[in-house]
Amino acid sequence: MIGPITDFPYLLQQVSDHMSCDKTLPALNGVYFEARGAYLYAVATDRHTMAVTRRRLETRTARPWAVLVGEQELKSLRAFARLNRRTPLTLEFRPATVDLFKPNALAVRAGGQSLEVPGYDGELPALWARDQWRETLTSHLHSAPNLRQELTLNPTLLARWGRSGGVARNAPLTVWTGGPGKPLVITCGEDFVGLQMPIRVSSDAAQPADIVSRWGDLASHAGQSEGQAA
């Protein structure tokens, strides 16, 4: 059993907006929990964005474990966490049992109350099973800021980052990218990091030089204002 986690409802909020809604990708329709070292990690992605948050553990697990909790099971977990939002939670991984045909499960406890939700029982993709999410995140997190041309982003996806701060609603975001074709790296505090992929723009889209030219009247009006003030 690991924990305590004092803000589990906010942990879920930080990553849930990044789950995939594509029912043909069930292994992405949930939140991936992993206990390793000094941290509990929660990860979600739909391949357009990825969000990772972590919490430092006072009581650590003897061995690393991981479980993917699907969208429907997350509803029960979210309701339990909200009901006990003033009580720190402890978590326990319960491995699958072949004889009873039970999948991996995640058990949470708050005081005298407890809940167990089953994990995803299908074959996990390499993203989870082979730590590709860690490799992807690490490679871009360590990339030096390098943006010498415009980066085009989906504004709907940008809105997902509003919950990045968790309980600290106005926590600032730190953002950079390794280049125009690389994802935007988005961090918030010490325990949240995410990625947002840029989008492709059609060849007939307005270019930066065209946009600057169309807004050329701003400069002329500014010059007139300065002359009048003098």
Image (cartoon, rainbow, N blue to C red):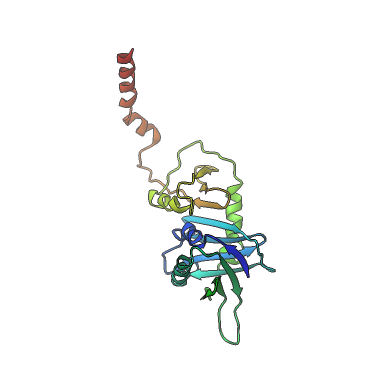
Residue 49: where, in percent of width, then height?
A: 48, 55
Residue reaching furthest to the top:
230
In the image, taking residue 117 as reference, residue 220 lies left or right, namely left
Residue 108, quarter of picture: bottom right
Nearest to the observer: residue 15 or residue 3: 3
Is 185 located above or below residue 19 in the figure?
Answer: above
* Residue at the (34%, 23%) spot, across then down: 219
Nearest to the observer: residue 201 or residue 85: 85
* Residue at the (42%, 46%) spot, across then down: 153
* Residue at the (59%, 58%) spot, across then down: 55
Quarter of the image with the N terminus in it: bottom right
Residue 165: where, in percent of width, then height?
A: 49, 51
Nearest to the observer: residue 86 or residue 68: 86
* Residue at the (34%, 29%) spot, across then down: 213
Residue 138: where, in percent of width, then height?
A: 61, 52
Residue reaching furthest to the bottom:
99
Quarter of the image with the C terminus in it: top left
| Number of dots carrying numbers | 0
Residue 100: where, in percent of width, then height?
A: 57, 86
